[in-house]
Image (tube, rainbow, N blue to C red):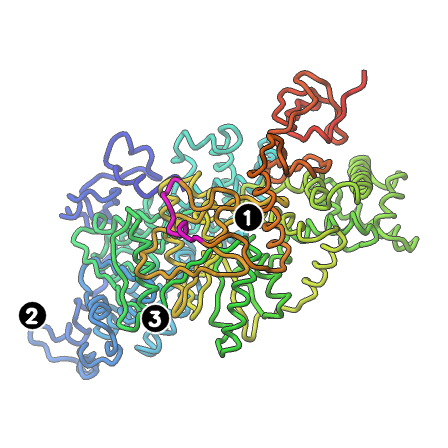
Amino acid sequence: MAHTGKHFANAAAVDGADELPFDLPPRGATATGAASPADDDEPPFDLPAAPRSAQPPRQQQPEPGRTPSQQANAPGDGGKRLSLSARALQGSASPRAEQTPYLQGLNPEQREAVEHLDGPVLVLAGAGTGKTRVLTTRIAHILATGRAYPSQVLAVTFTNKAAREMKERIGSLVGGAVEGMPWLGTFHSIGVKILRRHAELVGLKSSFTILDPDDQLRLMKQVIEAARLDKDRWPARQLAGVIDGWKNRGLTPDKVPAGEAYNFAAGKGVELYAAYQQRLKELNACDFGDLLLENLRLFMEHPDVLADYQRRFRYLLVDEYQDTNVAQYLWLRLLAKGSPNVCCVGDDDQSIYGWRGAEVDNILRFDKDFPGAHVIRLERNYRSTGHILGAASGLIASNRDRLGKTLFTDGEDGNKVAVSAVWDDEEEARSIGDDIERMHKNGQKLNEVAILVRASFQMRAFEDRFISMGLPYRVIGGPRFYERQEIKDAIAYLEVTANPTNDLKFERIVNVPKRGLGDTSVKRVHELARARGIPMYQAAKMIVETEELGGKARKALSDLIRSFDRWRSRLGHIKHTELAELILDESGYTAMWQADKSPQAQTRLENLKELVRFMHEFETLEGFLEHITLVMDTEQAGDGDRVSVMTLHAAKGLEFDNVYLPGWEEGLFPHQRALDETGQSGLEEERRLAYVGITRAKRLAKISFAQNRRTRGLYQSALPSRFVDELPEDHVEIIETKKPFSGAYQNFGGTFGRSSYGQSRFDDVQTQPFEGHYGTPGWQRAQQHTRDQSSASSSSSAKRKWSPSDQRRKRGPLMIEGELIASSSDSSSYRRGERVLHQKFGLGTVTDVDGNKLTIEFDSGERKRVVDTFVDRASG
């Protein structure tokens, strides 16, 4: 995310005032109207003063550290005799902290974090240091010592699961008192509670509804259509992402910076945002972003309401503070002006959600936001061995923007972090699968084994390998690879091409992407198929010859049938992998996800590319589809003893005895998109993600990277991730696998290990490549390629002995996510200005020639890059 918390750092400057998400009230006032010394330290924004006249009478509360009974018998009470109830309360006074059992077992740092109750506190809790125990014990200590009533404690976390766990732990420590904590929950649940109490003040009724994502998209489509915009060019999902980003930063329509208004629909983004908010009010509804945004507006426009909540909360506690966005940060800062007792628990080294609005700057500037803050570092780890912690701490030390801490353990050093190089991702999956199988035979529980990948497409190789081995596994945080929507859609297209009698697959994609075929049209095709006893595909061919369907629906269905017939005619004439790319391109399916601006769209495109890449393992389309059928038929329940497969983002908060971290290659990890979009901050977040991955391991962590990745049947050299060489050597063991592949083959492709980050220590392996014998197809191809290269280099002839182009077949326009695989070295017979004919895009003029790739301006107005073998010269 390009925007950071620094956006608010200079709020006092005149030039930056207009960028704040709300107008600033007069400076120098606190919630009680008195000047505060803390104001001299330039907080990131000014907070409204609650006028004394607007404040309701303050309810008498016990002084900090004193129970109600002690307050009743305090000096200055005129010597009045205590009432019976007061004396009874005095008899049940809370025990001293030293006598409380919940403090037993805490280490010195944890105990300090629990007992330091006065003033702002930041608990920097490293991975596995007992963060949750500290937070829950601190709340229990506040209640047990009478510092506050349960209703005076605001405790906020991010997930309902975490809130339930927190409540259960507190209950086990202090008993029924936890039931009196109405303000323990997530940001959204507490925001809803506040909003329902004061809904009328922000233009809502207390019975307002909260839209789910589907309803939100439907409403945005209506707003886009009302503005007479092309909904295909400006999809509702993209607008939803833009508006959500603004709401995460606390920006109402009138506060969106002028430059950002052009993020959607050529400057109409803010206008649509305002229209969307107006429609929400008319419907008496709000979305999830409004739950905090409307809270901010309520507090800023009604200082008396804010003052009431500031008085209400004596202690404020926030979990996972490093994951807060700007709106959450502002909401907390407003409430915190009523009490200095703010405790935030988090780990700046585990801030990995910047892509969804989290601001690591929030935790980095805590001591500036809360002057005099006491910072406590929890560095004693109870999860991992010494070498694992040493490797993780050494890696994260390369980040510049961090508060700094070094994890250690009182336990054993254990095994060093293992690092190995493999030939390709298939070999990586094979090696890890065999390793897990060996451990399982030696008594290792599979539930304590995890594979953490950077991108979901990496799961495919492991899933296929585990299925072939009969090794049970589960995918956490999402469906299995072949159960993902985009994969099932792509397979449906291929199935119908190969077997047009498959009604289920045809019905799945007949209107995907949208072609104007509604339920009524599909129902008529169904009825005809049942009446004639024929497949839906054949019924569709018949019905388009009649007037049964409307003009638009009939044309759309007719075009789809002709496309399937054309694709089917090319079976056996072009490679099945090229045909798959052609189908995904010409059907508009790839373009549909390219136009989708949601965070998941890029992942779906990567999964489609992985599917096509895997098809190279099979000789025919039929063989591939048969494999898919067998894979999908394999039952994979979530219970029982199973290996866990998940992305690194999904692994946060989990722990396993043995963790495998595959795919540590440049461009994949750190991910190229993160580097391109956010530069240095993106790189540091990727490094934090690596830190999170390593610290999931309790006993064993194994990192691997592939020297080659195959794309469309061609091997491309991969460079090891810069993170590999940032690991401290004292905590790393290099595994040099002797067979079937190992780091000995870095010369294949000629670029392994040589990058702008300096020479890798994996470059010094001297073993002769491809010695011995191994019967896999990958090994044989690599061995043959090496022999061909050797023969070519020893020949005195200037003629080339071997070239990939020697066996190149005719191919169509290969376009997935805009990537077109062709040769720039082969010359084309076409020239600029020539008229050509493409069987899908029609007539056009060649505007540029790059090898055998042509850039063509078609008469329809479209501009495409295609391979010259798929166009013909226009006659006449």
Q: How many marks?
A: 3
Q: Which residue is mark 3?
A: 414
Q: Residues within 10 Å of mark 2 (few under 14, many from 20)?
A: few
Asked whether residue 760 is drawn in magenta, I would say yes
Q: Position of residue 509 (x, y in %)?
A: 73, 48
Tell whether 61 sits left or right of 433.
left
Q: Which residue is mark 1?
A: 709
Start and end of the magenta stretch?
Answer: 756-766
Query: Looking at the figure, which quarter contains the C terminus?
Result: top right
How far separated are the C-alphas under marks 3 and 1? 33 Å
Q: Secondary structure at mark 2?
A: loop
Q: Which residue is mark 2?
A: 76
- Above or below for 554 versus 724: above
Tell whether 459 sits left or right of 856.
left
Q: Nearer the viewer, mark 3 or mark 2?
A: 3
Residue type at mark 1? Arg
Q: Earlier in the sequence, mark 2 or mark 1?
A: 2
Q: Position of residue 816 (x, y in %)?
A: 62, 40
Q: Position of residue 801 (x, y in %)?
A: 63, 37
Q: Earlier in the sequence, mark 3 or mark 2?
A: 2
Asked which quadrant contains residue 78, the reply is: bottom left
- Above or below for 348 versus 677: below
How far separated are the C-alphas under marks 2 and 1? 80 Å
Asked which quadrant contains residue 582, the reply is: top right
How far separated are the C-alphas under marks 3 and 2? 63 Å
Q: Residue at x 39, y 44 (%)?
A: 682
Q: Residues within 10 Å of mark 3 (few under 14, many from 20)?
A: some
Q: Residue furthest right?
A: 532
Q: Residue at x 52, y 64 (%)?
A: 432
Q: Which of the two residues, 57 or 310, is positioned nearer the viewer here?
A: 310
Q: Which of the two residues, 65 or 806, is positioned nearer the viewer here?
A: 806
Q: Secondary structure at mark 1?
A: strand
